[in-house]
Amino acid sequence: MTQVPALSYSSYHTYFECPLRWKFLYLDKLAEKPHGYFTFGRVVHSVLETLVRPLVVPSARRIGSAESQRTLDEWHPSTAAPVGTPWASSEELLRLYEEAWSSDGYTSAEEEARYRALGRELLMRYYEHLVREPPRPVSVEEHLEARWDGIPIHGYVDRIDRTASGGLDIVDYKTSRDLSKEDAKDSDQLSLYQVLVESNYTEPVERLTLYHLRSNTPLRARPRARGTLDRLHDRLGMVSDGIRAEAFEPNPGRQCSRCDFQSICPEFRPVPAPDEPRLQQLVDRFETLRAEERRLESDLKLTAESLHRAAEELGIHRVPGTRSVAVRRREETWQYSLDAVRPLLESSGLGARLTSGSQDEVRAIVRDRSIDPELRRRVAELGARRVKWYWELNESDRPD
Ligand code: SF4
């Protein structure tokens, strides 16, 4: 059994994509190669953190802390810069950016130069937006932890802002290429952050925002409804159970193209040269048998159908061969239209009897003598009988 560490969004997402990759990263702690786009995202995030941190008024009421909430008047009005808040100048911002720059992971000098110029452009545009509409941050890059119905979770939240009505807006910066409003609505990352913030702050979460830096656009969504959070909790539970049970099977897919562990992954490991001829033979034989199996299956079906037609024409159920006797058997099922059964049961106050909505469940209701016979008859009349014929082989010619 493996002890399950607190799950962050990226840990959960990694396991969901490929459990073996999760093991390499989080259990074996193997290092990944640096990638330019990750380095770029990290640098931009760190500059934004430095830029916005002076604006933070860390006064939201915290769960479990004695700190009391300050009044909204302590924040600047939303249209003006915060009084006394030292905004970095645009020159200082660019200096911060150049100081934070890292060349790790770029595949060429051209690629690095392209990203470097893009970063300058994104930051300058975002800076103008920030100065025009200064945020009212409660925290930046805050590490939050929680235990969500038995599952430990954690995460670094880029920014939490105070909304005009005194609630909280969770902001996550994105440097990725394309993002839409749907991404903000569907993002599991924002859902997890909502749970983390709700577990640590008493103020309500009023908004979730992915800030798309390339288009300088806030993609906003309302806080998640309980049902959405419950479904995420179920998925986190599956991940947590999988880790505990050491279920670390590879799950090949699109993610393999950006996985650094192909050389140690069984999905990509080549067959050792000495074993190649023997294994090649086995694969060829397997392929031949598979084809034979398919041919036999189709032959078996056609023969059974011919026997069935003959039995129908002759009105017989037992057909002797030279070694055994083919006996025709019947399997009977009843199919009910749930769209018709459900309202009937509901109008009789028995709607709760239909939980799974399976055909067996309806059949059990039809047979249940504790239910009004008239109702059972009406349900029964909604059923259609289906008969499936099949053949068995008997050694004896006597009917059993
Ligand atoms: S190469 Fe693909 S299957 Fe193998 S560990 Fe990486 S992501 Fe998983």
Image (cartoon, helix red, strand yellow):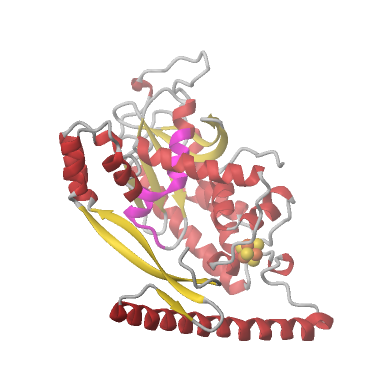
Q: Residue furthest front?
A: 398
- Image height of 166 relative to 230, above or below: above
Q: Position of residue 395 (x, y in %)?
A: 56, 72
Instruction: Report whether 381 appears left or right of 170.
Output: left
Q: Is 183 one of the magenta-colored residues?
A: yes
Camera-nearest residue between 350 and 201: 350
Which of 394 and 289 lies nearest the eye of the viewer? 394
Q: Is residue 210 above or below residue 87?
A: below
Q: Quadrant of ligand 1?
A: bottom right
Q: Residue at x 51, y 85 (%)?
A: 295
Residue 87 in view: no
- Position of the N terminus by quadrant: top right
Which residue is at the front of the view, 256 or 119? 256
Magenta-colored segment: predominant secondary structure: helix
Q: Which residues are magenta?
A: 178-195
In the picture, measured across the screen, residue 155 lies left or right of residue 137, that is right
Residue at (81%, 82%) from the top-left corner? 273
Residue 88 position in % (x across, y down): 48, 42
* Quarter of the rendering containing residue 282: bottom right
Q: Position of residue 176 (x, y in %)?
A: 46, 59
Residue 11 belongs to the span the image colors magenta: no
Left or right side of 394 for 375: left
Residue lying at 42% horizontally and 54% vertically, measured from the top left: 213
Q: Nearer the viewer, residue 326 or 210?
A: 326
Residue 315 placement: quadrant: bottom left
Identify the residue shown where x is 56% and y is 62%: 37
